[in-house]
Image (cartoon, helix red, strand yellow):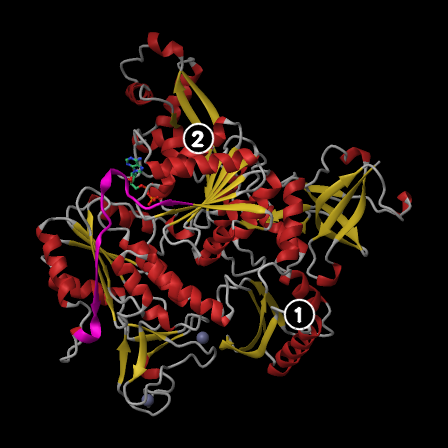
Amino acid sequence: MRYASVVLDIPTRSLDGAFEYAIPPELEHEVKTGATVLVSFSHRVAVGYVVATSPVPPAGLKSEKINPIEQVLAPPAFDETAAALAAWIAREYACTLPDAIRPFLAPGQKVKVTRSAPDAPWELQNERAGAVDARWAALALAANDYEPARSASRQRAVIEALREGPQRVSELSATIPGAASAVSALEKRGVVVVETRRQIRGGDQTTLSSAAAPRPEHLTAGQRAALAAIDAARTAARGDVVLVDGVTGSGKTEVYLAAIEHALAQGTGALVLVPEISLTAQTVGRFRSRFGDNVAVLHSRLSTGERYDQWDLVRSGRAHVVVGARSALFAPLANVGLIIIDEEHEGSYKQDKSPRYHAREVAAELARARGAALALGSATPSLESLQRCRAGSFRGATWTRVEMPERPGGSVLPRVTVVDMAEQFRGGGRGVFSGPLVQALRAMVERREKAVLLLNRRGFANFLMCRECGCVPECPHCSTALTYHERGHMLACHSCGRSWPVRAYPDPSTSCPNCGSRYLAAFGVGTQRVEDELSMLLPPDVEVIRMDADTTRAKGAHQRLLERFDAAECAVLVGTQMIAKGLDFPEVTLVGVINADTMLKLPDFRAAERTYDLLEQVAGRAGRGERPGEVIVQTYWATHPAMRAVASHDRSVFLDAELAERAESGYPPFSRLANVIVWGRSERDVRAVTDELAAAVRARVGRTPGWEVLGPADCVKARVKDQTRRHLMVKAPVDADVGALLGACVAGLSRRAGSNIAVDIDAYDMM
Ligand code: ADP
Ligand code: ZN
Ligand code: ZN
């Protein structure tokens, strides 16, 4: 008899942990680590995940007292190392074990079980559409000697079409009426063979002319150094980290491709993480064009069925390179030799729901556990990574920084001009475009090139403000400032989705909720308005393409807009943050930033870092081809270190100022910062829970140096969807085990009636 440790997926935190079950002999071959099983638990059935198996009964239990596993619901999705990683995540991020295990399961798998009859086997529900089978037709050898009857024109057409290669019968039918019956007739004669093939969804390759970047003849010196460092880290096989610190366009992606080739040559696979937003066909295309069908792609814009098929390619060992968003870390690739995180500074690598992990930290732990290397790439590395490289090591792994300060082929960094908008409009007048930006746009049109205009939407742009009293209308149900939408003259809440016509807010008689004035005016601009003003400014043959949340909602829309921009002769791409990353169009010679400083006012200690990163990223879109690029940054805060650093191409201007400030106020990278948020309908309960929690944390922390407990206090968004939100912040030394401490405090709470608790370790969103 063998035994299995099973983590039950039930929503009771007090039952968090593995329970022991016996493996009945008839299930011996199926119950493996990573399998989903059905067990009975206090007279009910429960779904659980096998995290370990053993030939000896658990200590202290008589074998006949141990309940058997009733049924296997899904085959193994993860191995022992992944199970250990899940346990690490649960501890590090103070979440439950099932929360940490679920990301490893097959896409679409749910926790719910049903059965058709009282004695029928249980079945897991899953939300993926069943795999699609398609009938494919191909010519047989006999086709060479076959001459269809004179009257059989359909057969002729089918044979003609199939000379190009095998085709789906459904596709043939779309172009040749009655193709299906002609195919059957030909199949009977042995002229055509028909077979059923399982379709692998999510593998479409869109072809952008710029996607298939040719392999360069020589790597630059910087690229060779980076590649050697990654190879060395992979050979060391202990989770060493290489930070590839390369300016935009320095050829980081080319380094990744070469490093993956080396990993594959050694028989290991690679995980490649890119920010969700830049997972365009352009990025994916570069990996597909180098590694073909050996690549699986995983991200959230795929349907569940597509994600399942791509995941299954990895599990079944058919794909050894996984390109995806942060959750690609959990793909069932057993033999990982290399993990790559591109744009490692991106905030989107932090997940904002449980498990609230940071992909960089999980990747470092995974690399250590698998004996792999971790390569981080960025033009603007996070202060955390820079600090670890300065120290040389972190959590037992070596951290090395390799610089790539030059672009291959000598294409120079673009010239950056910072325009002080206050000065521009000192004499009155308010416009979207400053004089220098208008001139640069016109010159770009004369040269028949392309431009990218960034509209920074995070921050205070696009709000309606009362010009009499300065009040910004807020949602009555959430404490979120309402954003103004020009279309329909509406105010919308981004927390709960409610919206009002401006006149109806908050009641039909007045406009300003505070003073009653009707003089509410838009503060900041929207992409729509930029688009409108541009079409007035530029000749009509210049294509203006707008890319924001509104125009990219439909599936594939993002891609189609980029294809239009790619194909256009002379065009301007106007967009929000989503255009700043990863786009590589050599004809872009001008980049304009409409409003560089909106984000600086956010209550977030990373506001300056985020502004600097965004400006560098978007500036890097200019002049990637042979022609030189120009960048124009419009701001009301021209003296800010982030603006000065971008203008002078000197990161140290920003870093010195920022690190000094972080050190002084004790923020990361000089500390760890955790945020514990409590929310619920009853303000009294929420207060009681936060108070008890704060007392518990303070009692544990005592006067330990480096620890500090702030709060409890109202969150910046103090009400969302009619729920009260309060929080507690904990600062701790960089090597402290914050997750374990806070997890214990939360587990020990005496009551939490109706209150929800989120423990966010190394928090990114402080609001
Ligand atoms: P990054 O990822 O750092 O932004 P990319 O890898 O996209 O840079 O490279 C920028 C451009 O330079 C691409 O068009 C790429 O094909 C080209 N490139 C990269 N490495 C080389 C090289 N060694 N020689 C010539 N061109 C290169
Ligand atoms: Zn709301
Ligand atoms: Zn007012």
* Vertical placement of residue 508 versus 363, above or below: below
Q: Nearer the viewer, residue 67 or 652?
A: 652
Instruction: Answer left or right for 290 relative to 536.
Output: right
Query: Quadrant of the image for the N terminus?
Result: top right
Q: Amino acid at mark 2?
A: Glu
* Vertical placement of residue 451 versus 250, above or below: below
Residue 405 lies in the magenta stretch: yes
Q: Please provide the residue range marked out in magenta.
A: 402-423
Q: Residues within 10 Å of mark 2 (few under 14, many from 20)?
A: some
Find numbered disc 1 in the image and state the secondary structure of the residue it sits on: loop
Examine the rendering and report whether any part of residue 179 can be seen: yes
Residue marked by disc 1: 704
Image spot of residue 724 (x, y percent):
55, 78
Image spot of residue 475 (x, y percent):
42, 79
* Vertical placement of residue 124 versus 489, above or below: above
Residue marked by disc 2: 261
Front tag of 2 and 1: 1
Q: Nearer the viewer, residue 379 or 336?
A: 379
For the point 73% across and 38% down, which residue is it?
A: 31
Q: Amino acid at mark 1?
A: Thr
